[in-house]
Image (spheres, grey):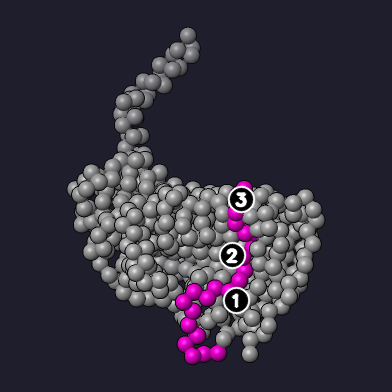
Amino acid sequence: MRLFISLSLSLSVLLAAGWNAETHAVKSKTASAKGTSVVDFGAVGDGRTLNTERIQSAINQLASKGGGTLVFPRGVFMSGAIFLKPGVNLQLDEGAVLKGSADRKDYPKMRTRVEGHFEEWLPALVNADGVNHLRIGGSGTLDGNGAPFWADFWARRKENPKTTNLDVERPRLALIQNSQDVRISGVTFKDSGFWNLHLYRCKNVVVENVRFEVPADARAPSTDGTDIDSCQNVTIRGCTYRVDDDAVCIKGSKGPFARDDKDSPPVEHIRVTGCTFERGHGVVTLGSEATVVRDVVVEKSRVVGPAALVRLKLRPDTPQLYEDIHYRDITLDSPAGSLVEVRPWRQFFDLQGQPPPKSVVRNVTLSNVRGSYGSFGELQGNPGQTEISDITLENIDVRLKNEKLNAVDVKNLKVEHVTVNGKPFSLTPAASPPKPE
């Protein structure tokens, strides 16, 4: 009886204060509904209507009012290049697709960073420049609609085998530059025409639980998953990669004067953890254009596709420094792929009349690796140019189709507790290549 009286009094107090269950439920629902739907600005998610102007108008209006989150609800919203502004975030709800147009005119050419320099080229589908505290999240999809762009590239390459990426302009899915405190989470990057996520001169970035994918049987040229270009303090965790180029690629500048390039500061403090690599040329690759890279850790990840695990590209035209690079706690499960691929990268290099520069690779470790893979691989630089030292292979137990490691001119190569095909691994030094005249 006392309990009943107490509950009755409590309810009377709440009712007197204007509280009721229905009102409370409405307020809770309103409070949790963050953001403004792009549909409120006239966007149509029918997969056919080009919504570029409506989406950009929504971004501009939100920015003019101090910012907010632009929400894409379920539907397929076709668009050309859009440009985020400070304070405006993107949310892609379940079933929401922001799909890129297949028409190049919907990506007006502009000065943009591509392959280590700037030129007039296509922007990305989603662009952000100087947008600190940016958030892109949700369980929806960024779809690059890449198939027509891939077909165009291969047709041009068939006509001219020397065709380069720059000759066939293709939009990236997202370019985020000159920004700090960026978080991208949950979304899927799908079928990009070119690189998926390009980060340039950013600091304190987290990319988590994101999937990067192209169809398993597609020839999708240069569909890098995440390009970390001249950035510091980037963490990638819990992501899945199925792409037709490097999964994670660390980039900077290139050429004999790369160390003088003020637009390309060193890449430092990169963490890749808890990821799954299903397809790609390299798991975490340094190059094709990179100058100074320090403090990279790749750990607690699974590789189930035929990629190179440790892939360091050494350009003969660039004074590179790669140091403190560590791969550890890796599980392998693929019939192909190489553990180590440290070697010259001569694609389209140009000394510009300068003498061949010197490069250094030092303090690289591969440790705590288990599983089955294709080959051990190789460790060698550009003859007379590259100094490779302090390489450690330890606590490795793998089954390989080709157990030979081709190591050339490597100083202080340590092999400890390495088992290949059930037997202790014995390194047979390779013969040094002849010195160039």
State the image quarter where residue 76 is shown.
top left
> Where's residue 69, x and y in %?
33, 50
Q: CA distance from mark 2 to mark 3?
A: 18 Å
- Amino acid type at circle 3 is Pro
Q: Residue at x 67, y 60 (%)?
A: 376
Residue 437 seen in this snapshot = yes
The answer to whether residue 195 is left or right of residue 394 is: left
- The magenta stretch spans which residues? 333-355
State the image quarter where residue 122 is shown.
bottom left
Q: Quadrant of the C terminus?
A: bottom right
The answer to whether residue 83 is left or right of residue 184 is: left
Specify few, some or many for label 1: CA neighbours under 10 Å numbering under 14, 14-19, or 20 or more: many
- The residue carrying mark 2 is 311
Specify few, some or many for label 3: CA neighbours under 10 Å numbering under 14, 14-19, or 20 or more: some
Residue 130 seen in this snapshot = no
In this view, the mark in front (2 or 3):
3
Disc 1, disc 2: CB below 8 Å? no
Element carrying mark 3: loop
Q: Nearer the viewer, residue 112 or 91?
A: 112
- The residue carrying mark 1 is 321
Q: Residue at x 77, y 67 (%)?
A: 428
Q: Earlier in the sequence, mark 3 or mark 1?
A: 1
- The residue carrying mark 3 is 335
